[in-house]
Image (tube, rainbow, N blue to C red):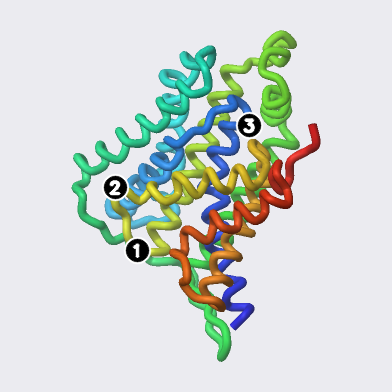
Amino acid sequence: MLLQQIINGIVIGSVYALTAMGATLVYGILRILDIANAGAYAIGAYSGLFLYQTTGNLALSFLGATLLTGFFGTVVQKFLYLPLLEKPPLIPLIASIGLFIFIQDLLRLIAGPQIREFNARIPFESIRTADLTINSVWILIILLTTLLLLFLWYVLNKTKIGLAWRATAQDLEISTSMGVNVKKVVAFNFLLGYGFAAAAGVMIGLLYNSVFPTMGDVPAYKMLAIIVLGGLGNPLGTVVASLLIGLVETLVAGYIGFFLPRDAIAFVALIAILLIKPRGLMSKKA
């Protein structure tokens, strides 16, 4: 029973990690809370569903949704966020909320308000024992999340663009004066961030067998809780916080029951942990 709940928590936490990673990367480099990243999550789910219905190939639909949404992210940063960089922080925040609402309404106009089924064939068999069940979708989610996070770690720590990203995250103006192509770094940042959000959207569509225009509502505020808990702009902290929130939600719901709505448990955990670690789990002392 405990092992089953822990696996459930890891699956949920894995999706949270990909959902919040895009917002973490954007905040890390631009210091902007990008609410529209939750819209990318919904775009990714719809793109994945459309591509799967067209091709019947889950791998192709996953890759296509990730790339298409990542490209959308590069357009967003060029025409929305870069022109607002010199404005007070509240302005880009309001712009991101407006873009998020626009995305939801656009999806509703294009695809309709109804819930659509995302019933894809998973290339794995479920694992079942007397005390444990690991659904085939869960296996897919854990494997893909692990691969994507390893890819992100490699890019940020072992490549020139990753070195430029870390330098820009430390100080954007000094990086510019030292010759770093900041526009290229920011564009790559949004390509990765929105691509990760799209991957999470496809996974959630498969996990719950449903896609709908407002599916980004809950992730929009939960990803904020996670990036605050992880120590604003810290990718490793985001992963740790996501797994922690997923495990807390699952274990509390499994052993104590729903004395609170499941999604509210994330914020109770956030408040409790921030009382002990006000700067988040992985933040560095100033």
State the SS at label 1.
loop
- Given this view, does label 2 or label 1 mark the residue nearer the observer? 2
Please tell me which residue lies in front, 135 or 285: 285
On the rendered structure, is 208 left or right of 275?
left
- Characterize the local packing of mark 1: few (<14), some (14-19) or many (20 or more) Cα atoms within 10 angstroms: some
Q: Which residue in the protein does label 2 denote?
A: 213
User: On screen, 261 above or below 148?
Assistant: below
Q: Residue drawn 64% across and 45% down?
A: 151
State the SS at label 2.
loop
Q: Residue drawn 21% across and 54% down?
A: 114
Q: Which residue in the protein does label 3 denote?
A: 28
- Residue at the far right: name it: 285
Q: Tell me which numbered mark, 2 or 3, is placed earlier along the sequence.
A: 3
Q: Residue drawn 48% across and 16% down?
A: 84
Q: Which of the numbered marks, if any, corresponds to residue 209?
A: 1
Q: Tell me which numbered mark, 3 or 1, is placed earlier along the sequence.
A: 3
Q: Quadrant of residue 116?
A: bottom left
- Given this view, does label 3 or label 1 mark the residue nearer the observer? 3
User: On screen, 171 above or below 6?
Assistant: above
- Residue at the far front: name it: 275
- Where residue 131 appears, as percent x and y from the top left, is 57, 88
* Type of amino acid under label 2: Pro
How far is disc 3 from disc 1 in space, using C-alphas? Answer: 33 Å
